[in-house]
Image (tube, grey):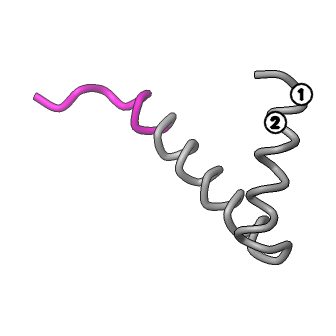
Amino acid sequence: MSAIEIILIGVVILLIFGGKKIPELMRGIGRSVKEFKDGKNEPPVK
């Protein structure tokens, strides 16, 4: 992806969700990634 595409996607997200929802959305994505990493590091269940 080029820088212009990333900027365009960011502008569209900003228009859809608004400025106040962006931090909340990013926080949720961060939590999801952390849970995925934690789950990946757990030993498999037998």
Q: Nearer the viewer, residue 13 or 44?
A: 13
Whether residues under marks 2 and 1 lie with C-beta atoms below 8 angstroms apart, the answer is yes
Residue 1 lies in quadrant: top right
Q: Secondary structure at mark 1?
A: helix
Tell me the crowding category of disc 2: few under 14, some 14 to 19, or many 20 or more residues within 10 angstroms, Cα based: few
Place residue 11 in its image quadrant. Answer: bottom right
Which numbered disc covers residue 3? 1
Q: Nearer the viewer, residue 28 or 11?
A: 11
| Three-letter residue code for mark 2 | Ile
Along the line of sight, the residue nearer the viewer: 46 or 27 = 27
Question: Please, is residue 6 above or below residue 28 in the view?
Answer: above
Q: Amino acid at mark 1?
A: Ala
Residue at image point 74% right, 58% down: 13
Q: Where does label 2 land, which residue?
A: 6
Query: Alpha carbon of mark 2 to alpha carbon of mark 1: how far?
Result: 5 Å
Apparent side of residue 46 relative to residue 5 in the rendered image (left or right): left
Residue 44: horizontal and vertical position, in percent?
Answer: 24, 26
Callout 1 crowding tier (Cα within 10 Å): few <14, some 14–19, many ≥20: few
Tell me: 9 left or right of 19.
left
What are the residue bounds of the magenta stretch? 38-46
Task: Look at the image and tell me in which quarter the C terminus lies.
Answer: top left
Q: Secondary structure at mark 2?
A: helix
